[in-house]
Amino acid sequence: MGRIKSKLVKRTAHSLLQEENNFTDKFEDNKKMLNELTPSKKIRNQIAGYITRVIKKNSK
């Protein structure tokens, strides 16, 4: 079982995925791309992790 992501994380991740298609299925790459967009390190990591998860799920 995983953690439940907040609406803020999901909403932000989905809007970023619609705007930019530069995200990959690697967490570290996504984290670097979000570095200047998010003010908080915790929120940045949550969004990068959720984006990674969504991309891996869609690629199956």
Image: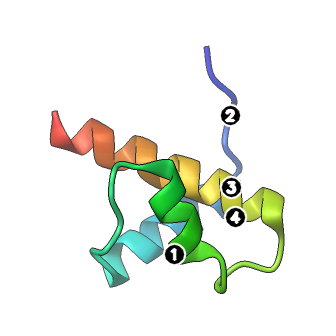
Q: For numbered disc 4, what is the local secondary structure?
A: helix
Which amino acid, by three-letter code, is at mark 4? Answer: Arg
Whichever of callouts 2 and 1 sits on the residue coming sooner in the sequence is: 2
Residue in the image at 63% along x and 22% along y:
2
Query: Which residue is label 2 attached to?
Result: 4
- Frontmost of labels 2 and 1 is 1
Q: Secondary structure at mark 1?
A: helix
Q: Position of residue 42 (x, y in %)?
A: 81, 57
Outermost residue toward the left in this view? 60
- Give the residue type that dot 3 points to: Asn
- In the rendered structure, which disc, 2 or 3, sits on the residue that comes first in sequence? 2
Q: Which residue is mark 4?
A: 44
Pointer 3 or 1: first along the chain: 1
Precedes in sequence: disc 4 or disc 2: 2
How far across and down, in percent of the image, does residue 60 sit? 16, 33
- Image depth: mark 4 or mark 2 in front: 4
Judge left or right: residue 46 versus residue 22: right
Q: How busy is the neighbourhood of tag 4: few (under 14 within 10 Å), some, or many (20 plus)?
A: many
Q: Residue at x 31, y 74 (%)?
A: 22
Task: Say which residue label 1 marks.
Answer: 33
> With respect to residue 30, does 46 lie above or below?
above
Q: Which mark is residue 45?
A: 3
